[in-house]
Image (cartoon, helix red, strand yellow):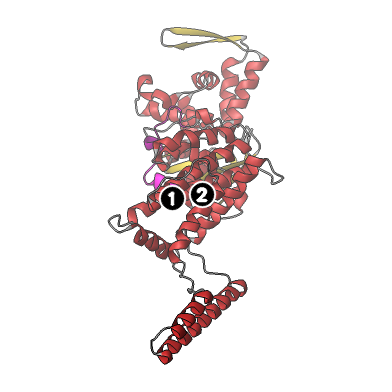
Amino acid sequence: MQYTSSFRDVGRGQNVDEVLVGGALKKITNYLSDPFSSGLHKLSFEWVSEGGISKSVMSMVHREVAGKDHIVLVSGKRERKINLTEDWNKSVVEFVEDKITFLLSLFDFMVRRDEDISEDERGESFGHHEVTEMVLDLLDYDVLRNEYNEAYIYFFENIWDSKFRTDLPRGKIHRNKSGNFFIVSGPLDETNCTIFAWEEKPLKAIRDFLVLVGKLENSTLLPMFSPEEELFEPYPDVLAFVYSKIFTQQHLLPIIRKGLERYDEHNYLDCVGSMGIAGEDILTQIYETLFREQLDKGLTTGQLLDEIQRRVGTLFKAPEPEISDVANLYKEVKEGLEGSGDKGEIALQIIRALIGNFHNADKLLFGKIDKVNRPEKKHSIFPARIQNLLNDLIRYRNAAAHKSRVPIGPYEARRSAYCLVVLFMWWDSEKAKVSWNSDVQQIIKDFVLRNNQK
């Protein structure tokens, strides 16, 4: 199931720190850095369209408008005349029967009325659609409160708080009193609904509330660690909400934002391209920080990685045995025979040199044979996981840049974003572990040792 959101709306009207409940940022960061380990919790259920509280609400509405061709709604000093057309009735039915937002608005209104919270104090949390406001003006809240008292109490204790918002667009992280959650599909999309969260509690609150108002059946609530396609489904939209908290280097933010915007537009090639450009920036930082020299501009992701690996390899490369030029030995023999020195001692020195030369030649030859049969051990500053993710990012980046036959779709775009997030978080963490007073070679050797321990 693929879904999209408008990147421009992600976080609009919301302060990330206010929306995230408790330690939610840490949980979301854990998900972004390792979805397979942290996993998600998934609530799936079938939406009951015409039943439950919707039936009671529609009965009240029909009773209020029966025999009328219009109604007048008063809001403060303003009066509105509403013509009761077929289109009006259709829109009301849709909102009442198939919008979670309407249910939340209804109970939010009742709580705020009971808590004596004024219109001004409601602020953005009460940003209802005008149809919802019309319906709310037609209801008898005391009757609904008594009929659904258990649901009301549960809503107040487990879902509502002073920062609660009733609008639940997809592509945003939402909150209730029990925690944060993320809607993948709601009742307006299809009968089968899906909501994700980073813990069970907020999903349980939603499920139990919907049961109490008769709008849910055949639900499952389970942790999810696989399949990968489903686990990664909300990844770009979750990243879009908190990317400024993840990427602490300001110059990277426009690049990440562009990539996420392109994903939202279904332009997956450019999304991968942007993630690749950000990856190249990070690899350049790694090279120039560790080797203390500037790199040539215009290197690709793969070339940058190769250059880092090559330079690291030179620090661990054993010197090859030195083989003397045999011509020099002939010269020494000639000088020894023509000279006045001890011929025996001179011969002994020459024999030693010959034997040493033969030994080094054998050592060099057998060393080369061993390299063919047994590949030389490669040293890397990157742990195996980062190396594998870099290989993925390079493959996707090359495919996007050259428009090769390798397909670039939503899955590859999500994986590219994931590879970039993990690379940045790893590098950001590694910098804090380095003893920067050590010499360059020792710092690099410590990197290799630290990141390649079994």
Q: Which residue bears the numbered disc 1?
A: 287
Query: Image height check: is 14 above or below 245?
Result: above
Q: Which residue is mark 2?
A: 304
For this orientation, the residue located farthest to the right is 405
Three-letter amino acid code at the position of disc 1: Tyr
Which quadrant of the figure contains the N terminus?
top right
Q: Which residues are magenta?
A: 11-32
Which element carries disc 2, helix, strand or loop? helix
* Camera-nearest residue between 454 and 83: 454
Q: Is residue 29 magenta?
A: yes
2 and 1 marks in contact (CB < 8 Å): yes
- Measured along the vertical axis of the image, is residue 300 above or below residue 382? above
Nearer to me, 126 or 215:
126
Say whether residue 124 is visible: yes
Q: Quadrant of residue 157?
A: top left
How packed mark 2 is, by other alpha carbons closer than 10 Å (few <14, some 14-19, many 20 or more), is many
Q: Is residue 199 visible?
A: no
x and y percent of residue 388 in the render? Answer: 55, 57
